Image: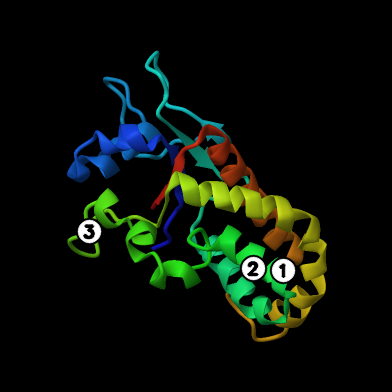
């Protein structure tokens, strides 16, 4: 069964005021708000891009729906593509791309920050494979660093085209983005996500 990715930018103070065991449920309610009498099975189509929950209350989170794909697997595949390419990338671009992608779609930094990446004390651990779990958590300071890295990486994306062709388009390299354009489109969306989140001084949470 495929897993979708729902990304939130979140005011950490407001999230911290919610009991740990209730946080995933509260975010789910924000992502899929229901009015009395609605059939709330998550089966409706949500507008693409950023949107905040309806109502007069001040927003403390906003939900992002990807234009490229809402499925989680393509994001994992893009991270795998970066893993394949990065040994051949110049040191300055590699360092900035590592900062930008780390903990979003590329997991090499989990050894350094397992609690933040996997939820840690921010969310309760999943009790079993059917329990809600967290795909990513990035604190505001980490998001700000990613936004700065993105500013430096974006002008260099075209430099990766040849490496993508060599490492990811060869016969037998299943599980990678289909084209370089698909890869870059996904990176640009993430660039927009971290830029807007950093502008607000909020953090990021990704749920299935």
Q: Which of marks 3 and 1 is nearer the N terminus?
A: 1
Q: Which residue is drawn at 28% across and 44% down?
A: 24
Q: Residue at x 41, y 68 (%)?
A: 110
Q: Can the viewer see residue 32?
A: no
* Disc 2/disc 3 C-alpha distance (Å): 31 Å
* Disc 1/disc 2 C-alpha distance (Å): 5 Å
Q: Residue at x 82, y 75 (%)?
A: 162
Q: Where is residue 75 in the image (x, y as percent from the top left)?
A: 55, 61
Query: Between tags 3 and 1, which lies in front?
Result: 1
User: Which residue does the numbered mark 1 point to in the structure image?
Assistant: 92
Dot 3 falls on a residue whose secondary structure is loop
User: Which residue does the numbered mark 2 point to in the structure image?
Assistant: 95
Q: How crowded is mark 1: few (under 14 residues within 10 Å), some or many (20 or more)?
A: few
* Disc 3/disc 1 C-alpha distance (Å): 36 Å
Which corner quadrant of the image does residue 15 belong to?
top left
User: Which residue does the numbered mark 3 point to in the structure image?
Assistant: 125
Dot 1 falls on a residue whose secondary structure is helix
Relative vertical location of residue 48 with respect to residue 71 in this rendering, above or below = above
Towards the viewer: 163 or 109: 109
Q: Position of residue 125 (x, y in %)?
A: 22, 58
Dot 2 falls on a residue whose secondary structure is helix
């Amino acid at each position: 069964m495929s897993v979708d990715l729902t990304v939130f930018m979140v005011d950490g103070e407001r999230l911290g005021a919610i009991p740990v065991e209730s946080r995933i449920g509260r975010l789910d309610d924000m992502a899929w708000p229901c009015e009395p009498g609605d059939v709330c099975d998550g089966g409706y189509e949500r507008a693409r891009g950023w949107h905040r929950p309806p109502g007069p209350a001040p927003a403390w989170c906003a939900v992002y729906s990807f234009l490229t794909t809402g499925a989680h697997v393509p994001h994992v595949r893009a991270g795998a593509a970066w893993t394949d390419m990065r040994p051949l990338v110049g040191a300055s671009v590699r360092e900035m791309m590592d900062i930008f992608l780390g903990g979003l779609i590329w997991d090499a930094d989990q050894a350094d920050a397992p609690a933040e990446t996997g939820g840690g004390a921010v969310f309760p651990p999943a009790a079993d494979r059917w329990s809600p779990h967290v795909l990513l958590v990035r604190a505001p300071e980490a998001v700000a660093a990613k936004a700065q890295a993105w500013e430096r990486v974006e002008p260099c994306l075209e430099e990766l085209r040849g490496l993508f062709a060599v490492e990811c388009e060869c016969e037998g390299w299943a599980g990678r983005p289909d084209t370089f354009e698909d890869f870059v489109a996904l990176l640009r969306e993430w660039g927009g996500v971290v830029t807007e989140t950093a502008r607000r001084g909020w953090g990021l949470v990704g749920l299935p």
